[in-house]
Amino acid sequence: MEPYRAAAARAAEQMQLYREDLSGWRSCKRTNEISISWKPSTEFHGNIYKLEGILPAKPEAVLRCIKPEDGGLREKWDKNVKELLIIERIDDNICITRTITPSALMKIISPRDFLDVVQIKQDENGTILSAATNVEHPECPPAPGYVRGRNYPCGCFCSPVPGDPGKTQLLSFFQSDLCGNLPHSIVDSFFASSLAEFYSNLAKAVTTLVA
């Protein structure tokens, strides 16, 4: 149990560092609703992406849409999540998950699965942090038919918007190694489009799926 708790703690610490790090980010997409930027990851030979936006719901409602649950809401709205399974619950705030993703970009990217430890916690200001990173688990070895990808410290901060408690400031970080023999151009194109879709679908979900 302790190695998983340590990995979860490190993921949460890295998320705080990413949140405070304002240097080196390069914009790759900006609209009236979102800002997406990136820079080289220090965890692997790929990029870390940052997504910023405002969601039309309280942080608790956003959490209900993103928190890991067997057959939960995440499978209903996130088109990049085909199935999400809880492999083991470490405690009330930490669990091990297996996320199965569908093929993408007209099947250029084949189905993947990711095994992560996920921690959810809330600070005194009402900000909810969901932090995750890759782990291994004896009950979930790599499976035939899927490329085992690796998520490096990633997740999101859901913060109350000052003066408007009915809205949430979303700050998300993604850094995933899809593994396999994929050209960097394909991977970069996939993340730029999928992050925008992630925000759009989450914004709809917090108003339609959460009572």
Image: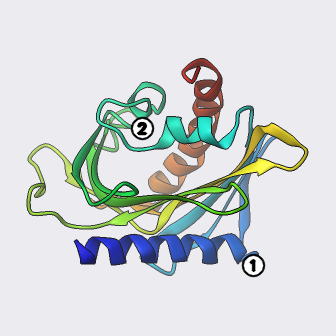
- The residue sitting at 77% across, 38% down in the picture is 167
Position of 5 compared to 120: left or right? left
Tags 2 and 1 touching, CB below 8 Å: no
Q: Which residue is mark 2?
A: 80
Task: Find numbered disc 1 in the image and state the secondary structure of the residue it sits on.
Answer: loop
Is the residue marked by circle 1 packed among few (<14), some (14-19), or many (20+) residues within 10 Å?
few
User: Residue 3's quadrant in the figure?
Assistant: bottom left
Q: Residue at x 62, y 78 (%)?
A: 17
- Give the x, y percent position of residue 135: 26, 67
Q: Nearer the N terminus, badge 2 or badge 1? A: 1
Q: Is residue 82 above or below residue 47?
A: above
What colour scheme was applied to this rendering of the protein?
rainbow
Left or right of 94? Residue 41 is: right
Looking at this view, is 180 or 33 the one in front?
Answer: 33
Identity, as a three-letter code, of the amino acid under mark 2: Asn
**Residue drawn 31% across the image and 59% down it:** 91
- Position of the C terminus, as image quadrant, is top right
Tell me residue 7's x, y (percent): 35, 74
The amino acid type of the residue labelled 1 equals Ser
Give percent across and percent down for residue 123.
64, 63
* Left or right: where 124 falls relative to 138: right
Local crowd at mark 2 within 10 Å, few (<14), some, or many (≥20)? Answer: many
Q: Under tag 2, what secondary structure? A: loop
Q: Provide the residue designation for mark 1.
A: 23
Q: Residue furthest right?
A: 163
Is residue 197 visible to us here? Answer: yes
C-alpha span from label 2 to label 1? 29 Å
Q: Where does the image place residue 50, in percent across and percent down from the top left?
A: 64, 59
Above-or-below relation of 211 to 124: above
Q: Is residue 208 above or below residue 133?
A: above
